[in-house]
Image (spheres, rainbow, N blue to C red):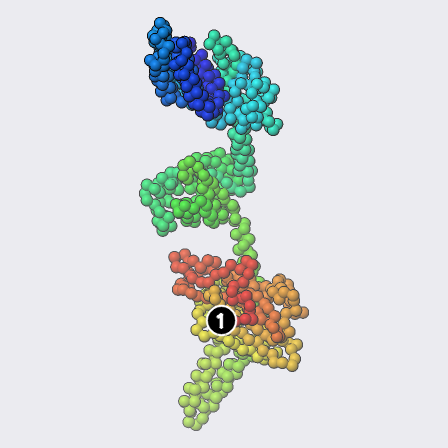
Amino acid sequence: MSDCHRTRGDVDFVARVSTTTANSVNGDRWGYPAAALVLAMLFCADLWLPVHGPIAALYIIVVLIIALCGRQALVVPAGVICLVLTTIAFLVSPVTATNPNAVPDFVISGFVIVGVTALAFQLGIQRGPLLEQARILELTHDTVIVRDAQNRITYWNDGAERLYGWARQEAIDVDCHDLLRARYPEVDVEMALASHGKWVGEVTRQRKDGSEIVLASRWLVRLDRLGRRIGIIEASSDLTAERRAHEDRRISEESYEAIFHASPVSIWESDWTRVLAHFRAHGVTPQTLRASRDQLSIVRNLGSTRIANLATAILFGVETPRSMTGKTFVAHYMPSTEFALAEIFATFLEGGQMREVETQFRTTSGNIIDVLWRATLLASEAEWSRVLITAVDVTDRNKARTQLEQAAADLAHAARISTLGQLSASIAHEVSQPLAAIKTFGESAKRWLAAPTPALDEVVSCLNGIVSNSTRASDILARVRSMAKKEASVPEVFDMAELVMESVRMLQREASAHGVHIREFIEPDLPKALANRVQIQQVTVNLMLNAVQAMDKVEGRSREVLISVTLTQDQMMLVRVRDNGTGIALNNPNDIFQPFHTTKAEGMGMGLTICRSIVEAHGGAIRAENNIDNGATVAFTVPMLIGEVDTEHLQRDDGHDQTGGIVVMARRNFGSGYPTGLTDVNGDR
């Protein structure tokens, strides 16, 4: 017999055996008791009946029963027991002496028992692997179906039950095509089966619930021992989930490609595997990258661009995205780009997956552009082999922000000039006092010198008075100039208590004209403040002037403004300006900080809005509340100095200077709330 025929026969036998595996297992329940009963009956018959030979040959029934039970190890012991019992019956039975054929019958019976036992044992050995294969057919997730020549199902494994939904008893003896509604290239299949005896391809079938599935199927022709076709054995695996995943992946890739190329944002993908290999080979760490730029001159040329979109070509001024493939962007680097690149590399070495920095590039035409640069590590087999980079051109945004900041500075400057205009009478009065004193001291000095005996001591005293009052007048003018001058907002260290007292002196005459008394409460041992002194004084003067003017209609009680400076729990200075006027006639007193809101006929409604902008730009907050009794309180916070600072390198944005020194100050995020010190502007700290 050929190998092909033998293989098909084995598989066919496995299919038949697998349908009876459960019966073989269940045979243990009745097989052994039945074998014992038959053995006892045969032994008794062998003792007393005169036909010893035929009865002794029936012992093979016991051996066959044991073999059918599936216990291979018990077949030989069962044969030995049968041989021993037939020997005992031959020796003990009284019939033996009267039967002239007893000895030949005994010998023949012995040979029959031994032969059947050996044959059963040998068949059991051959049947064992086939039983294992039958169990495998039941355990496999693939479907295994055996069909006869009329296309009726003769075997249906557990995998077929799970996939198609029909139980084995529902599928056996049913036409396979009628049950599963299969669709496949019938002509090609028949030609392949006829010429090669097998076929491999895809089949579409219908499950019990009506849903269709696609399967990868392998069909093998079943042949009998004469080589005649008696059916088909097939094994199939479900491709539906794989096809769905493949389709989802295809759609995802197409969507990604469409978004990638159609995006107005510059996007490109780079391969940085050689960069990572260089870092590891030379022991480069995030700390060394941030401290020194020596390695950047090497690794910046090791990366390569895998793909870039059209927006990238437009951003950098190159002809096509394809012309950037396999190249680096070194030609477009600026000095600040290397700082940004080092920060991205350091973040990835620390285990980060994304880093965003703002830097500059130079286009092909030589223009300098500001770019928000983001690098993201994508999942891949090789580390750093797929780095997705996006670049957003923020040049126009930065220009607009600069113009907006300049406009805000101009508006704040105009507000300060307006405030000085309102205080012109007070300033003139304050300056006139030292000027009048200078005149008086000068005339007195002339009289003392014109006396018959000049009193030089008195002259010196008068000259000291002139110097002292001129210094006083100079200080007054310096304060006015500081509020009037237009310069960049640079934070500085200053004494907040001194600023408050100076502001009170500036407003003293205005307060007297309105019949208002200004009192100060300064918490002792205050630390220095860290902010733009001119702008903080502008806020302080504006709030005090508003408080003074808010009490014009107050009658029957004293008009008083209290300005206090204390510390909050979150290391900020809290400045409160409290009056006992008529209060703020709004449901939400904080609406007074909205643009163009004013209670003055000649006001523009921008003063308090500018105050809020100034305070929030310094990391503080400002709010207003009506007092429980009379009037209102407006409070704001100012950053305080909590560490050493180099005043020559202060920056207003993040407190870091270009020389490595760090400014340490209290900062808060005031997106939706206020610092602890402003939760109740009328309460204690």
Residue hosting label 1: 566
Q: Residue at x 57, y 26 (%)?
A: 166
In the rendered image, residue 196, in percent from the top left (x then y), is placed at 48, 12
Residue drawn at x 44%, y 69% as measured from the top left: 528
Which image quarter holds the N terminus? top left
Is residue 648 or residue 235 the one in the foreground?
235
Choose between 191 and 288: the one closer to the eye: 191
Circle 1 sits in a helix, a strand or a loop, which is it? strand
Q: Residue at x 49, y 67 (%)?
A: 568
In the displayed structure, 553 sits above or below 178; it is: below
Measuring 54% from the left and 74% from the top, which residue is drawn there? Answer: 563
Could you say where residue 663 lies in the image, as x and y percent from the top left? 42, 61
Check disc 1: other Cα within 10 Å, few if <14, some if 14-19, many if 20+.
Answer: many
Q: Is 414 above or below relative to 329?
A: below
Regarding residue 372, the answer to whether it shows in the image is yes
Q: Position of residue 214 (x, y in %)?
A: 55, 25
Q: Nearer the viewer, residue 89 or 118?
A: 89
One can see residue 362 in this view = no
- Which quadrant of the structure image shows residue 418? bottom right
Left or right placement of residue 678 versus residue 387 in this view: right
In the figure, residue 7 lies in which quadrant? Answer: top left
530 and 152: which is toward the camera = 152
In the rendered image, the residue lying farthest to the left is 282
Amino acid type at circle 1 is: Thr
Name the residue at the bottom extreme: 452
